[in-house]
Image (spheres, grey):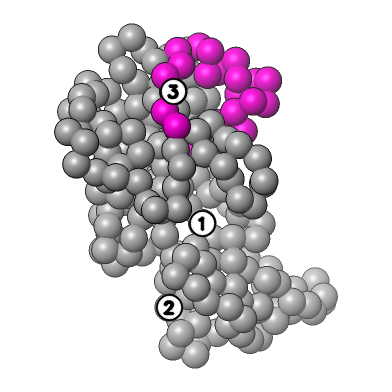
């Protein structure tokens, strides 16, 4: 049964943007500061981090229901992390094209079966980043023709789906994309069903130029000097 949409107030946005100012720009992310006035009277500043690449991840399952995990050192956390294959999609890539490339580069694998699994915003209080997660099965070798980046030291491990769920609950697997992917598939297997909105599902296979997010559109207006 399709659920009715969650209620949204008649005038949901309480902010009047007075100015947007670019502070930092790199090939991966950008930072701006907005000056605003809230309709309840408060004036202030809001720092927003924008990601130029879409976060893409794949829950890849082999014939024995084992999850493909990638181990690597995560610089911001200063700790080692086991997670699903993931990476950033370039502007000219769809999330599907990006994650197929990442699966081949990181795990030397291709998949014959792909489907959208989940879409979410990893940290919507301070960034406009959005994540696209896929489920991939019918795995086979990519032939060893793809290679990881020069600054990546990756390890590959296969772990049963149930064991991965245990590691999520214990906190051992803490990467956001991995946690959401594993819990989403577990919800499906537990009988929770829903049909993804068709327009959202299309975005898994479109470039950002073909279907930009509201966040990216806002950055374009900033570049055009429009608040």
* Location of mark 2 (residue): 220
Q: Nearer the viewer, residue 144 or 54?
A: 144
- The picture places residue 19, in percent across and down from the top left corner, at 63, 86
Q: Which residues are magenta?
A: 155-179
Residue 126 in sight here:
yes
Q: Give the position of the C terminus as an image quadrant.
A: bottom right
Mark with earlier residue (1, 2): 1
Mark with earlier residue (1, 3): 1
Residue displayed at 21% across by 28% down? 141
* Location of mark 1 (residue): 129
How many neighbours does mark 2 have within 10 angstroms: few (below 14), some (14-19), or many (20 or more)? few
Mark 1–mark 2 Cα distance, whole angstroms, equals 15 Å
- The picture places residue 4, in percent across and down from the top left corner, at 48, 36
Asked if 55 appears above or below 144 in the picture, the reply is: below
Mark linked to residue 162: none
Mark linked to residue 157: 3
């Amino acid at each position: 049964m399709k659920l009715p949409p969650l209620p949204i107030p008649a005038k949901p946005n309480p902010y009047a943007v007075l100015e947007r100012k670019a502070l930092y720009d790199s090939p991966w992310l950008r930072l701006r500061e907005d000056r605003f006035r809230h309709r309840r009277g408060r004036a202030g500043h809001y720092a927003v981090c924008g990601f130029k690449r879409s976060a893409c991840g794949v829950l890849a399952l082999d014939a024995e229901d084992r999850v493909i995990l990638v181990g690597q050192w995560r610089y911001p956390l200063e700790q080692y992390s086991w997670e699903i294959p993931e990476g950033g999609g370039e502007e000219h890539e769809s999330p599907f094209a990006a994650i197929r490339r990442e699966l081949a580069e990181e795990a030397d694998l291709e998949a014959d079966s792909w489907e959208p699994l989940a879409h979410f915003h990893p940290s919507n209080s301070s960034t406009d980043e959005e994540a696209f997660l896929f489920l991939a099965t019918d795995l086979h070798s990519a032939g060893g023709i793809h290679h990881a980046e020069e600054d990546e030291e990756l390890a590959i491990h296969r772990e049963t789906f149930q064991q991965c769920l245990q590691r999520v609950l214990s906190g051992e697997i803490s990467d956001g994309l991995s946690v959401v992917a594993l819990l989403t598939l577990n919800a499906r297997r537990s009988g929770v069903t829903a049909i993804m909105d068709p327009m959202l599902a299309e975005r898994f296979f479109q470039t950002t130029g073909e279907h930009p997010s509201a966040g990216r559109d806002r950055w374009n207006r900033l570049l055009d000097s429009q608040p």
